[in-house]
Amino acid sequence: MDVIKQMLTGKLVEGYMPMQMLFELGSFALLFIGAFYFLGKNGIKVNKLAQATGLFVFSILYFTYRIYPPIPFSVRAIYATMTLIGIFMWVSSTEESWKDFRKPIIAVADANTAITKMIRTVVVVLLPFLVGFMGYNSMKPNVDEPIELRTVHPAPPASTKVHGKTFVLQTASSPYRVDDAGKYSDTIQKTHIDGNPWDEKAPPYLQYVREGGQIFFQNCHFCHGDNLNGRGMFAFAFNPIPANFTDPGTIAQLQETFVFWRVSKGGIGLPREGFPWASVMPPWEQHLTVDEIWKVILFEYWHTGYYPRTWD
Amino acid sequence: MNCYFANVSRKGLLIAALSIAVGAGAGSAVLWTSGDVAADSGLSPGFVKGTNPPKPDPKMIEDGKKIYFRKCVWCHGVDGAGDGPGADRLWPRPRNFNQGTFKIRHTASGELPLFDPNKPTPGQNDLFETVTHGLPGSAMPSWDGILTEQQRLQVLSFVTTQLVKDRKFDDKTETVSILNLADKDAIKQITYGKESIEKGAKLVVDKKCVECHGTNGRGDGNPFNLKDDWGFPIQPANWHKCWNFRGSRQDPYNVKNIFRTFSTGVNGTPMPSFADNTTVEERWDMANFVASLCERDAAGKPLPIDPQTDKPKINFVVPSGFVEGEIPADPNDKKWQDRERRIIGLGGQITHKPRNFVNRIDDLWMKSLYNKNEIAFLFQWDDRSKSQVAPGVNVVPIEEAPPKTGEENSIAAKQNKYEVYNDAVAIQFPAKWQEIVPPEKPRYLHGEEKRHVDLWKWEADGTLKAYTGSGWDKPLEERSGATGKLKLVKSEFKDGLWTVIMKRPLKTDDKDNDAQFETGKYIPTVFFAWDGHNGDAGLKMAVSAFYYSILEPPVPIEAKVYPFLMALGMIIAEGWILRRRASKKKMTKS
């Protein structure tokens, strides 16, 4: 509900970009069509071509300026083509609307009045210039950033060896996600989600959370941020920017053992599709013990309020 | 969906309630009343008298405590003394709340900041705005989107009542003098423009700003002797990087933020308030001048700021432009001046030991030119001091010990006490990038054993050497033959700015180890920088992400010819369509 509230304020909600885009575009399309329908009911007929052009121009502007981070031109071109097809399907859905759509075009081509004659002259003169300009623009050398697509969550190995010990990802579990008796518990986080890890009488689980937090704030926040959203002090320098744990697409989607593998082996331990050469994520086995790694992961889930995915 | 409508109606109610409050409270219920300042009020020009804020509701304090121990305690500590587990690896250190000393305020120097637990109004709630926008240049992030407005007010209710120990916000002996920026009559803003900037340039000299902030405002005037109220070293702001101003409120080019800092000073630091010894107009002039120094594009427009990071937008390509004849050695030469510069973001190297948690160099500005035979790179970056290794000093970078020994062993306490090494920059290319299929690259940190890199490193002692890197864990190996081909065209330190130009032939004989430059090809590039006064050496350095260098190819002949043919084709098509339409029309008529 908080997310919808944020969306209504017009702010981009991190992690919900595709949903928000569809939501907004859908609302605007409905608004457009509704407005034209309303105008038509009240005797103001807006020509279909004008409607279609308005809708198309609006979507282009939306793709270019609204979506952040900006999407590359090639992707925008695909979106624009799809939008164009959609608009054509809409205007050609009935014989009547298709005729209405064609009417101004034919009127300009025929040029029976002074105004259409003027428009035709302008179009006839401008069109070759436009085509030539677009041709030059696409052929002149460009030095834009190349698009390189990286797999964000690559397939994990079956097992990983950290500090001489082998962890099988399917069967290993966090030794600190435990109840007061020291037994692994899926529900312990939920029980203490509002607890205070700094309380001296805190149960073992929360004490581990506190220890994990201490490690996080001595090592991880420089990139992943003090609020765990991937906007630490160093984040702006790196590409891609560090993982945002508050985004529902990161740790919330992953098993705890997957995160253990990623933290232990770091960027250099990624498979090729994950771009190991570009990641500055340290292989944390060089800086932390196995226990410390489990604790910091425990902390990340508790702090964001997400639960690790389970194997089923 | 039910819930969604409930939210909307609640918002509606809120708006209704607010408008009633505003209507009813004209003059009495608002935080302060505006009006003429009496001559004997003791207030500085531009300030009005305010009232002490109400005490927060106990429930808010209680809820705020929960948030504090979830989100804030890690840096600010259990007692709010700025000594949480994260504190000792941070510089600047997290705020110690106990004394009630806060930097960014609308109140007179020395006074508590504005905080009202019930009103998150911009310009009337300093602490709320600090939590909302964060403090760039420090580890304090923006909490907007992470904590709701109500949660931010709750946690501040806890901090201001329980963790600020030496003073009380509702204490009637606490004076509240407010810089009321909303009062257009008292605060006549001087428009940003040439005239005001020129006046400001004189004023910052008269008012001795340059003594700390440096002749050109790069924060290099007095970089090593300043301390904050707690005895930790502190550096004057660099006016060229307004996006790092703590009080920039995610709006770095806004002059109002700078005017506010001039008017209120920065509590807890040597930065005084200028409210008593300048007029409002003079402060605007100074603020306009400071804003004018912030880096801008060639047309003088503010740099576009990336809303994801609140820093200048980065383009990860460094294009090299072709010039006829000699590449100039003077960066002010027209050939260099005409080139677009690109910003390179830098973070501390914290992937491998020795890690660099505080990188004093956080960006470089790059330009590149090439001619028939050579390629040149122009590096410019801000550094508050020229650092050069003293004879006989053994260069051994250290990683800070794990922070468990308290403040005296913290990074903040150790600033300015490091052994001084060389300032340095380096640029790295894959040795045989032609053989690697993009997007693959040798690893950013000195490449890999089987895919080595060609790294050129300049140091402040005047050396420029070429090295082979074959992995982060192997020492760089100098190639003396390649070093001979590198040429240091210029290296100069002036008023807090380093300028280094280096060049090399485009092609060399050693194709296995020297990067070869071809036009129109994207060549992966990584940048490194060292600040000698930060104890930087070896892997203790600042690193960039991957960039691409590309030698801009000349416009091909096809691009000059084909567009004309395409336009011609269009004209023919138009003629054909119109003729067809005309004959059709004739047919229907007849």
Image: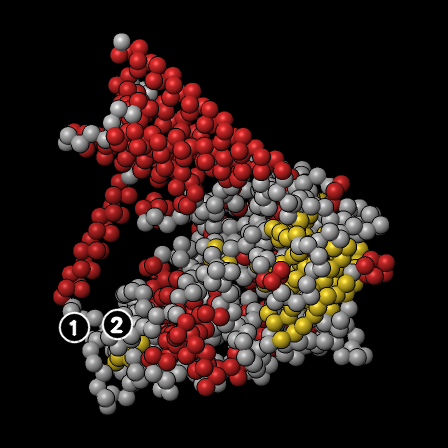
Return the chain for callout 1: B
Residue B378, given in percent of the width and then of the height, sits at 66, 62
Determine whether, in the image, residue B461 is placed left or right of residue B481: left
Q: Which residue is mark 1?
A: B27
| A297 or B207: nearer the viewer | B207
Q: Is residue B164 visible?
A: no
Q: Which residue is mark 2?
A: B184
Determine whether, in the image, residue B453 is placed left or right of residue A216: right
Q: What residue appears at the point 49 percent right and 68 percent down from the top-left corner?
A: B294
| A16 or B555: nearer the viewer | B555
Residue B370, given in percent of the width and then of the height, sits at 69, 54
Question: What kind of element bears circle 1?
Answer: loop
Mark 1: give few (<14), some (14-19) or many (20+) Cα within 10 Å: few
Q: What residue appears at the point 49 percent right and 70 percent down from the top-left corner?
A: B293
Return the chain for callout 2: B
Using the rendered view, name the quadrant where residue B233 is placed: bottom right
Q: What residue appears at the point 46 percent right and 66 percent down from the top-left corner?
A: B135
Q: Colour mode?
A: secondary structure
Residue B20, given in percent of the width and then of the height, sits at 15, 61
Please state, as top left, top right, bottom left or bottom right, where the N terminus of chain B lies in the image.
top left
Q: Counting residues from the N terminus, which is met first, the one under dot 2 or under dot 1?
A: 1
| Distance in Å between CA atoms under marks 2 and 1 | 17 Å
Picture mark count: 2
The residue most toward the top is B590
Residue A244, given in percent of the width and then of the height, sits at 51, 50
Please state, as top left, top right, bottom left or bottom right, where the C terminus of chain B lies in the image.
top left
CB atoms of marks 2 and 1 within 8 Å: no
